[in-house]
């Protein structure tokens, strides 16, 4: 199988079998991109998620684009991006005409409620996994605690919180030089 076909199939599967957005996709990204194909490392995946949070667009699409670019350059980025959005595009187009009818169906309504709870569990699991990988020192734990407190207690945007954390990291790096 050509490398482009492998990239396409990997990202198509991720796009097809994930509900709930970028964070819910993280376990599938890890399984396909790190464990199965060894396209990227765990730290690269965390970096791509971090960058994906700071750039416009959907996190999953950004991660796919960054990963595809690492594997095969611009053409790999294009293949990965197309593959991850294609399942959603096809499903949305197919459901658009019948969504109103389905939303009134009790079985479908309960299924969506169950899916929402499952997605929350997936995201919480991923947050715990990311925390264990990303917070490895007292300084990082301190940054986490301060940013979390600012987000919970203040009226600070996510962008500002990320910029504050990045600023602390840069200051720390400059002190080490």
Image (cartoon, rainbow, N blue to C red):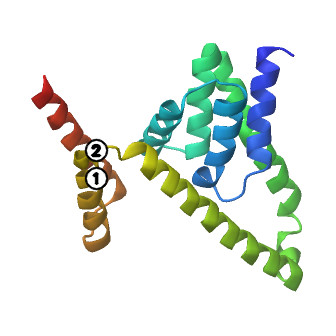
Q: Residue 137 shows which numbered tag?
A: 2
User: For the residue carrying disc 2, how many other residues have a C-alpha within 10 Å: few (<14), some (14-19), or many (20+)?
Assistant: few
Q: Quadrant of residue 8?
A: top right
Is residue 166 visible in the rendered image? The answer is yes
Numbered label attached to residue 141: 1
Q: Is residue 109 above or below residue 15?
A: below
Disc 1 residue crowd, few under 14, some 14–19, many 20+, Cα 10 Å? some
Query: Where residue 165 sits: x, y (%)?
Result: 26, 47
Up-down: is 96 above or below 33? below
Closest to the observer, 24 or 103 = 24
* x, y percent for residue 126: 55, 54
Q: Secondary structure at mark 2?
A: loop
Residue depicted at 72% across the width and 39% down the height = 84
Marks 1/2: CA distance?
6 Å
Q: Position of residue 53 (x, y in %)?
A: 45, 46
Residue at 50 percent across and 41 percent down: it is 49
Q: Residue 93 bears which disc, if any? A: none
Left or right of 58? Residue 80 is: right
Side of 159 where 16 appears, left or right: right
Q: Quadrant of the N terminus?
A: top right
Q: Quadrant of the C terminus?
A: top left
On screen, residue 170 versus residue 80, left or right, reads left
> Which of the 4 image quarters holds residue 47?
top left
Task: Pinpoint residue 58: horizontal percent, then vertical percent.
Answer: 57, 46
Mark 1 in CB contact with mark 2 (< 8 angstroms): yes
């Amino acid at each position: 199988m050509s490398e482009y076909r492998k990239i396409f199939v990997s990202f198509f599967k991720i796009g097809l079998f994930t509900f709930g957005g970028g964070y819910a996709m993280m376990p599938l990204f890890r399984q396909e991109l790190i464990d199965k194909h060894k396209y990227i490392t765990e730290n690269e995946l965390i970096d791509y998620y971090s960058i994906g949070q700071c750039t416009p667009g959907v996190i999953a699409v950004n991660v796919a684009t960054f990963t595809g670019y690492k594997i095969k350059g611009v053409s790999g980025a294009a293949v990965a991006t197309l593959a991850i959005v294609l399942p959603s595009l096809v499903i949305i187009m197919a459901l658009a005409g019948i969504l109103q009818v389905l939303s009134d169906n009790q079985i479908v309504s309960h299924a969506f409620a169950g899916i929402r709870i499952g997605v929350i569990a997936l995201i919480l699991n991923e947050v715990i996994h990311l925390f264990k990988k990303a917070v490895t020192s007292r300084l990082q734990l301190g940054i986490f605690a301060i940013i979390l407190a600012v987000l919970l207690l203040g009226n600070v945007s996510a962008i500002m919180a990320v910029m504050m954390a990045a600023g602390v990291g840069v200051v720390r790096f400059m002190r080490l030089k």
